[in-house]
Amino acid sequence: MKTIKHEIREYALNLGFDVVGFASASMVPDEKRALDQYVEGGLHGDMGWMAETAERRADPTALMDDVKSIIVVGMNYGPKNLAPLPSDRGNISVYARGKDYHDVLKKRLKRLGRWTGERWDCGIKVFVDAAPVMEKPIAGRAGVGWQGKHSNLVSREFGSWLFLGEMFTSMDLPPDQPVADHCGSCDACVRACPTDALSGDGQIDPRRCISYLTIEHKGDIEPGLMSGMGNYVYGCDDCLSACPWNKFALPTQESAFFPRTELTAPRLADLAELDDAAFRIFFSGSPIKRTGRDRFVRNVLIGVGNSRDISLETVCQSRLGDPSPLVRKAAEWALERLRDRRDTID
């Protein structure tokens, strides 16, 4: 006879989720303590919402007062290949090259939630990376994977390429067994980080992380960090792609996560010309749209400055009069970098 867990897992897998785990909704003191230390240390940077929601994030009952269990689902977004790009091309993180994962997972989680709620007459709430949920620690307790030294979840089957979603339920279901940490002495992800954002003990300083800088950081970026950002214009995959567990991962079979051709190797020169209207059209249906045109073009110009391609000087010059001071300052930095490059050649 099938258990409730078995039926839910089977239905979720049939919906297209790749992995399903079950965890207790109890608050875990160690997780709360780690979050408090993280926020008190100012490591959240511009992500003020982390401080504002810290208490709710640590206690699942703050989001659903009668929650007893949390069902964690994951979808593989593993890339087919990750070949290096020429320096005059913008590098976009793998997760943002296809359709917005928030929409894809949320739609399927709602279907899972409706079915579960009707089947067992229980309370349900679903979340995908937009609510104060400690999704990685919970996923670890649900047996989906463990948090690697890059602080992201690692799976023996899917490597570092899993999108996560959570379904809170009032049903009290037996939790799955957590997965042991299998990183061992490996520090490949730590060594791969271009801006030294990883400490080696599973902690990350987002204020130095390229993903944070290109997506969350609202202001100007320190020159020392800009020079380490290479041609990344949105996110970064260096620590994830360095993980040896990825050798067991298969490319995603979900067509929604297949990369859009125009986002695999876009020309920096073209991206720098985007105004607000063109930016919204170009990134329609993409998570990149949330960052906004000004921050994105700032990132593009940093990539231009790091390209060492003096033919892109005109790109910088065209943005010196941009309405956004954020863009203008990045254009000035990039132009100075390229002129220094030209002087060394001459």
Image (tube, rainbow, N blue to C red):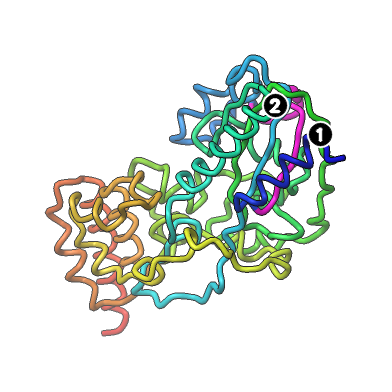
Direction from residue 44 to residue 204 in the image, left or right: right
Disc 2 target residue: 120
Q: Residue furthest top?
A: 65
Mark number displayed over residue 112: none
Identify the residue at image location x=32%, y=60%.
300
Q: Which residues are magenta?
A: 18-35
Dot placed on the residue nearer the N-terminal end, 2 or 1: 2
Give the tally of numbered discs.
2
Residue projecting furthest to the right:
1
Q: Position of residue 77 (x, y in %)?
A: 57, 59
Does 226 appear above or below 247? above
Q: Give the residue number, with chain letter if any, for mark 1.
A: 175
Quadrant for residue 121, please give it. top right
Q: Secondary structure at mark 1?
A: loop
Q: Residue at x 77, y 61 (%)?
A: 186
**113 shown above or below 223:** above
Q: Is residue 192 left or right of residue 70?
A: left
| Amino acid found under the numbered disc labelled 2 | Trp
Q: Residue at x 48, y 65 (%)?
A: 258
Dot 1 surroundings within 10 Å: few (below 14), some, or many (20 or more)?
some
User: Residue at the left extreme?
Assistant: 321
Quadrant of the frame with the C terminus: bottom left
Q: Measuring from the top left, give residue 132's x and y in whole percent.
A: 55, 28
